[in-house]
Amino acid sequence: MVIPQRRKSVYFFTALGSCLVVAAIALNVSWGMILNWRTSLLFFFGFLFFLIIIAGVVLNTIFLVREIKRNEQHDAFMNAVTHELKTPVASIRLYLETLQKRELDEAKRQEFYQIMLSDSDRLISTIDQVLNAARTSTSNATQSRSRLDLGALVEEIIRLARTRHHLAAEHVQYATAFGDHERPQVVGDADELKAAISNLVDNAIKYSGADVQVQVKLDRVPGRPAVAVRVSDAGPGIAPTELKRIFKRFYRIPGSVSARIKGTGIGLFIVRSVARRHGGRAYAQSSGVGQGSTFTLELPLPPERPRAI
């Protein structure tokens, strides 16, 4: 398209006028600075110091807000841990005093023993969580690494979870994408991996409510030499904005569900820390509130051992 000569002239003089205006302003400012260099220098440094002070106030406010949130999360953690420790201890003490002061038939005694054992398991679980969080958050902690049969490890954890929560096999189902002759192995610390996978399974059971429907799957990771442990539930689900926050230490999703279900807020932090220490990753997926959720722990597969010739 050919631009008419008149329009070209308009464009030329507009550009020329703009350039002249810019040149006039630049000349005026430069002469003003030359003639009043002391005032300009004071203005420059004053403006610079003003920006530094504003930046300091903003940074101080950000750090203050973060520290307040961290203290609130720490207080919530301490309250949760205190509750998780005091409740089973008080329960065990109450049943022991009852056994000591009253004559009970054998059936009642066995019932009390079972309750005390359950409370003991809860107490040990809380202590293990705190110790695992302290250990996994220490970057230079020693690890006892070895080749582990991940399938056997997951099956053992599921059996223990069914026993601990008194669930039938159909409530916590296990599946694998690997064939009968494929046994995916990972190199890692057995205790840390057990703690991470147990946290995922226990959380899925706790948040499922009365109708527990948990699926644990040992799956392949497309495009990468890695294996995934996926734990799915039909629980309350997770809002998209919370999917990354839930892996922070002491963080618990605000709402009635989290308030009803007791916890320390360090379980998923342990999962993420263990995943990173083993060269893998942990993440959550959910279609939204009320849609259930899936937690995945991915671990790299070790290089294949050379076959003997």
Image (cartoon, rainbow, N blue to C red):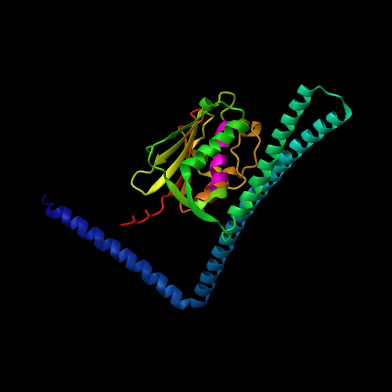
> In this orientation, which residue lies closer to the viewer: 45 or 246?
246
Q: Position of residue 210 (x, y in %)?
A: 59, 24
**Total residue callouts:** 0
Q: Quadrant of residue 17?
A: bottom left
Residue 236 is situated, as x and y percent measured from the top left of the image, at 54, 29
Residue pictured at 37% horizontal, 67% vertical: 25
Residue 222 in the image, given as x and y percentages of width and height? 35, 43
Q: Is residue 98 left or right of residue 16?
A: right
**Depth order, front residue of 106/33:** 106
Horizontally, is 58 left or right of 280 in the view? right
Q: Is residue 305 above or below residue 19?
A: above
On screen, 44 above or below 167?
A: below
Instruction: Point out the image quarter for the C terminus.
Output: bottom left
Asked whether the viewer can see residue 165, the reply is yes
Q: Is residue 73 visible?
A: no
**Does residue 135 belong to the magenta stretch?**
no
Q: What residue sits 55% from the left and 42% below the top?
A: 246
Q: Nearer the viewer, residue 11 or 46?
A: 46
Of 172 and 102, the residue lying toward us: 102
Residue 98, position as x, y percentages in the image? 84, 29
Could you tell me which residue is drawn at 46 percent across and 54 percent down? Answer: 279
> Which residue, as the protein is rendered here, is positioned at the far left?
2
Prevailing SS of the magenta stretch: helix
* Quarter of the view holding residue 101: top right
Looking at this view, name the residue that lies furthest to the right: 101
Is 194 contained in the magenta span? Answer: yes
Look at the image and give the residue range highlighted in magenta: 193-207
